Image (spheres, rainbow, N blue to C red):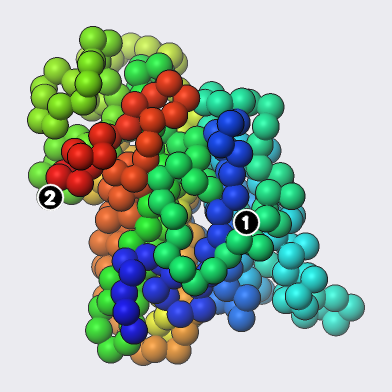
Amino acid sequence: MKSHNAITDVPGIRVGHAQNTEALTGCTVILCEAGAVGGVDQRGGGPATRETDLLRPMHLVEKVHAVVLAGGSAFGLDAAAGVVRYLEERGVGFDVRVARVPIVPAAALFDLDLGRADVRPDAAMGYQAAQNASTDPPAEGNVGAGTGATVGKIMGIGQAMKSGIGTASIDIGGGVVVGAIVAVNALGDVVDPATGAIIAGARTAQAGPIRVGAADYFADTLAVMKSLVGRTALGFASRGNTVIGLVATNARLNKEQTNKVAQMAHDGLARTVRPAHTMFDGDTILSLATGKKKADVNIVGAFAAEAFAQAVVRAVRAARPAGGLPAVPRQEALSI
C-alpha cells in the first residue's frame, strides 16, 4: 500500500474538514464507522472536551465511531452533534436495543481571538465535515480545526504566529501503520525536534520579515517565562490555547493499550512544543486502534510519538498568514 504520510494511511480511517475562512474557525472529523477501540490522554490545564471519560479503562463502551477536533472553544463542541446525526442516518452506533447511539468524542481549541468570536463550529459544520470525509490525504494548514490556530502567545495574540493542522504516518513493518493528525494552537513555540531551534512562535516587538536562524525574531517563550519568575505577570498571556490531536493505528490493541498509546504520543508533543502542558493549554490527544494486526504496544506507542511530532511540525509549515498574523514563509517552510 502506497504511503501518503497522512493519518488516512491507517486502514479504516477517513478524514473531512469544514471551515469558515472569514470567521477563521472550523472543524475536522475523523471517521471510523466500523468502530475502533478508543483511548485518550489529557494533560493541559484548560481542556474543552466531550465524551472523553468513556474512553478510559473501566468504562463500558469500548469502540467509538468518530472523533471531532474543532475550533470555537467549548462552543465548538456542538460540531459533534452534527457528526452524531450523520452516523445515525447511516445506522452506525452503539446498540442499545431501541436505537444505535454513535459514539463521538470531541476536543476543541480556543480560536475566538482571531477572526470572529461570534461564529463557531456548530452541528451543521460538523455534518458537512463528515460528508467531506474521505481516505484521501487530508489538507493541512489553515483548514478544519486548524483554520484559526496560532502559536507563541506568551505576549498576547498580537505577537503570535499563524499555525494550522498537520498530519503524518509511519509504516512500522508487518503491515502496521501509525498515523497522527493535530491542530496546533499552543501558548508556547514550535521547535525542530532535531535541533531545538524555534520554527514558529512568539515574536519580538520589533520583529520584521521572518529570517531562519535570526536571533532577534523570536522572543523565545522559555526565556520570557524565566524573566517572570517571582511575578504574576503570566496573567497577560493568552489563556486560550490547546494542542488537540489524534493518533491511530491498524494494530490490534485493547482499551488499556490504546490509552497507553495516547499517553506515549504526548512525548511527541513535548518534543515539538516548548513549553507543553501548561495551565493555559488544554492539550488533549485521543487514540484509535482500528485493526487486527499484531503489534507490541510499546512499539506502537513509540512511533505514535514520532508521528505526532512530525504532524506538529507539518502543521506550522503548512500554515498561511491570516488574521493579521504571519506564518512561516513557504520557501523557508520547505527548507526547515
Using the image as rendered, state which of residue 219 and residue 301 is in the foreground. 219
The quadrant of the picture occupied by the C terminus is top left
Q: From this viewpoint, is residue 43 visible?
A: no
Q: Residue at x 28, y 89 (%)?
A: 174
**Image point (43%, 21%), residue name:** 324
Q: Secondary structure at mark 1?
A: helix
Q: Badge 2: how crowded within 10 Å, few (<14), some, or many (20+)? A: few
16 vs 235, left or right, is right
Point out the tag, 2 or 1, that comes first from the N-terminus: 1
Any part of residue 178 in sight: yes
Residue bearing the label numbered 1: 129
Tags 2 and 1 touching, CB below 8 Å: no
Q: In the rendering, at what x and y percent does residue 322 appear?
A: 44, 29
* Residue 169 horizontal side relative to residue 213, left or right: right
- Between disc 2 and disc 1, the foreground one is 1
The image quarter in which residue 55 lies: bottom right
Report the side of 128 relative to 156 (left or right).
right
Using the image, tell me which numbered label, if any, was put on residue 179. Answer: none
Q: Residues within 10 Å of mark 1 (few under 14, many from 20)?
A: many
Q: Position of residue 115 (x, y in %)?
A: 56, 26
